Image (cartoon, helix red, strand yellow):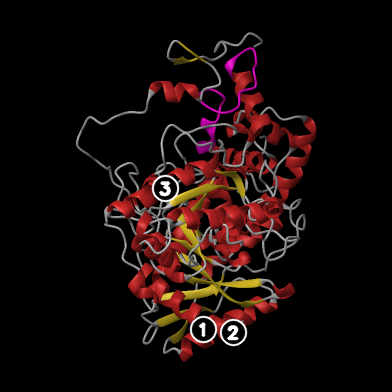
Amino acid sequence: MANADNPRTEAPISEADVAKVARLARLDIDDAHVHQFTEQLAKVLAHFRDIDALDLSAVAPMTQPYPLVNVMREDVELPTLDTDEVLAAAPEAEERRFRVPPIIGLDD
Amino acid sequence: MATVPTTASAIAEAVASGRVTAREVLEQHLAAIDAREGEIHAFNLVTAEIARARADGIDADVRAGRPVGPLAGVPVAVKDNLCTRGVETTCSSQILRGWKPPYDATVITRLHGAGAVIVGKTNLDEFAMGSSTENSAFGATRNPLDTSRVPGGSSGGSAAAVAAGFSPVSLGSDTGGSIRQPAAMCGIVGVKPTYGTVSRFGLVAYASSLDQIGPFAVTVDDAALLTEVISGRDANDSTSIPAPPMSLRASVGAGVAGMRIGRVTDLPGGAEPEVEAALEAAFASLRAAGAEIVDVRLPSLSYALTAYYLIAPAEASSNLARFDGVRDGLRVGAADTNAMYGATRAAGFGDEVQRRIMLGTYALSAGYYDAYYGKALKVRRLIADDFARAYSEVDAILTPTSPVVAFRFGEKADDPMSMYLCDIYTIPTNLAGHPAMSVPFGTGAHGMPVGIQVLAPALGEQAMFRVGGALEASAGGAA
């Protein structure tokens, strides 16, 4: 993302950008998809330039429809999900736990 | 066999009084599904046996004189992004194929409590991302009115189910128009309630600050009935508004005399001429019914598409991070977890979902956050402020639901931007968190139905249903 300081002066998005974003998003996509997504996302990002004309310096961001405050409740004991039922949906489970491949990479 | 009424309210009344049985109602609808589902593909799964058991249980309650709910024996189709305990919930995605949730969504619990009989899980654009239901991993849904055309989306299966007579009512979800747009394209009623009035617990999240569950129905009254049943505070959704279920059915026939209805003078253009004509006819009918039509301006509306397609993918990129091959659904094996995540997600998500995840990841990434996501949040504020100014002058606003009538398969599938433009009139409501509904009103190009959208301020559902009811009452003459 070489153009990060001034994102709007160059082509909206490069294949290198898309490949990096795919890595960040944990999407192991092939080169053909990188090429295709770059073209499509460039078109979408070009449309998004319409908001560049707006002066938004005095506008506060709106993250949700209603001003959300902390939602508190009494600490009441309630039934939880059934462990066996939850683990039955897992690709792999062992001894009442989710089983995953090694977290420390073998190849990097 | 007794004659089965067509509306949900009449079915519930007939079942509760014992004039027809829930089982008779169900079998008639299952027969309709058998006859045409192969052609329409409204469902990912028809749960006939579970439905039969439930219908028989309701009939037993009726025979025993036990109270039954306001939807007693009413068949309901539900979008396949609503969790149903022990029943496959796929979001029309390979990544969730075979997943059986260990809990029910709150709206499912409320439907059951009201006596409804869930008949199946309906098809959608994968994870509700799309406007045509062509993006389903399990094949497209066809529009029952013209099977060469899309039903709209993303809740296309729920809209098609009602339009085809598979169920009198159904549930969908609406993040940027995913209930209202398919309702318009299938010639039925669709409602997106105020954000927070219907619990999102158990709705697989797409964009949490925009998502809302709502009904499809043939009549405005049935849409009001369903909204009443599913609304109300839920402790399992911290964004649900602390208010009791809404009371709406009395508003449907209340008329619009004395109401002030907004006409947006700076509405973004691009609607088909027949759609524009239907909107004018809708204004004329409301004026004839005693409403005053008032010009309003919403200058920021033209930027809503950009704000939406930055905010929704940004939230989606975060929400969909949970699909990683660990707890449920698909796993593509690999030597370590990181490789497993990447392989699983690339294999499990379709192209449009991957595009939106990447768009969102990009908009949130270092160096781009302020330029994209941050700006979009500010535009969202401008749009909400525009609506607030307009609603100081009017009770409701009328626009088209969709700029176009139902289009042919493949027409927009390869051009994301042209597909996104289908949502231009529906997304501002989601950004503001307001309620909106689509009511069929007249016919457009190719003989396909046109939907008129009624917008109202937050918690303005009663005003919205008054206008919707008046449009429905006069739509016969306009068609």
The vertical placement of B60 against B468, above or below, is: above
The residue that appears at 60% across and 48% down in the rendered structure is B43
Q: Which mark is residue B56?
A: 3
Q: What residue is shown with label 2?
A: B478
- Mark 2–mark 3 distance (CA, rounded to whole Å): 42 Å
The vertical placement of B4 against B399, above or below, is: above
Question: Is residue B326 highlighted in magenta?
Answer: yes
Of labels 2 and 3, the one closer to you: 3
User: What x and y, as percent, mark residue B176?
Assistant: 54, 56
Q: Earlier in the sequence, mark 3 or mark 1?
A: 3
Q: Amino acid at mark 3?
A: Asp
Mark 3: few, some, or many residues within 10 Å (few <14, many ≥20)?
A: some
Quarter of the image for residue A91 reads top right
- Mark 3–mark 1 distance (CA, rounded to whole Å): 39 Å
Image quadrant occupied by the C terminus of chain B: bottom right
Give the residues drawn in magenta, as a range. B318-337
B399 sits left or right of B448 in the view: left
Q: Amino acid at mark 1?
A: Ser
Q: Secondary structure at mark 3?
A: helix
User: What x and y, as percent, mark residue B216?
Assistant: 50, 61
Q: Main secondary structure of the magenta part?
A: loop
Quarter of the image for residue B183 reads bottom right
Question: Is residue B20 highlighted in magenta?
Answer: no
Q: Earlier in the sequence, mark 2 or mark 3?
A: 3
Q: What residue is shown with label 1?
A: B474
- Residues at badges 2 and 3 in contact (C-beta under 8 Å)? no
User: What x and y, as percent, mark residue B332?
Assistant: 65, 22
